[in-house]
């Protein structure tokens, strides 16, 4: 009986360690909810509060393997928790993924056309260099020239 208990305890430890090592993947509905919450924050507290909250690496808009980013309709990155250097770039409309897709252009098209939707592209996971398949939900903040986005890795 003691051996069975030790085996069960070992299995629990291994599964827990594996979950921590691999991390949890965000779900589509969680990404949408995060974007809606960020949009609401911006509407209620203003763009400066949105920039501060979205830009925090350990902030309220980073969850599991996903994070919210904030842009304007001119393709200016206003806040990104894992790549704050992107806020200094003025060439994002020319950026394409490894397949040649200009995904920032697609973000703006979605934000302008329907105000919300999904864009598929390749982008590295946080703390990695190799691009991975990603789908980002884009949500225009109503009544503004801003949109938020967050993605899931496939």
Image (spheres, grey):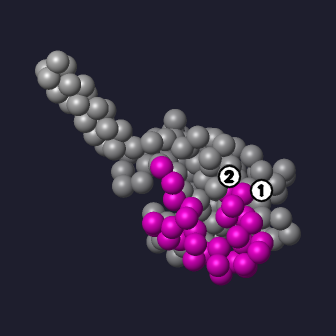
| Residue 148 position in % (x across, y down) | 67, 61
- SS at mark 1? helix
In this rendering, position of residue 88 left or right of residue 38? left
Q: Residue at x 58, y 48 (%)?
A: 151
Range drawn in magenta? 35-64
| Residue 115 position in % (x across, y down) | 81, 54
Between 123 and 93, the one lying in front of the other is: 123
Q: Of helix, strand and loop, which mostly describes the magenta segment?
A: helix
Residue 129 drawn in magenta: no
| Residue 66 position in % (x across, y down) | 52, 51
Q: What is the spatial separation of the Cα atoms under label 2 and label 1, in whole angstroms?
A: 17 Å
Q: Which residue is mark 2?
A: 33
In this rendering, position of residue 85 left or right of residue 113? left
Q: Which mark is residue 111?
A: 1
Q: Residue at x 62, y 47 (%)?
A: 30
Q: How many marks?
A: 2
């Amino acid at each position: 009986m003691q051996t069975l208990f030790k085996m069960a305890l070992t299995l629990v430890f291994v599964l827990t360690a594996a979950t921590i090592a691999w991390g949890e993947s965000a779900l589509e509905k969680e990404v949408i909810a995060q974007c809606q919450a960020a949009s609401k924050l911006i509407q209620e507290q203003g763009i400066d509060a949105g920039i501060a909250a979205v830009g925090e690496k350990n902030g309220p808009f980073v969850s599991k393997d996903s994070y919210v980013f904030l842009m304007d309709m001119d393709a200016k990155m206003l806040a990104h928790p894992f790549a704050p250097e992107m806020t200094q770039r003025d060439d994002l409309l020319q950026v394409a993924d490894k397949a040649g897709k200009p995904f920032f252009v697609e973000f703006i098209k979605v934000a302008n056309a329907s105000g919300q939707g999904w864009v598929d592209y390749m982008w590295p996971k946080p703390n990695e260099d190799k691009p991975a398949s990603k789908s980002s939900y884009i949500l225009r903040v109503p009544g503004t020239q801003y949109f938020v986005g967050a993605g899931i890795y496939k």
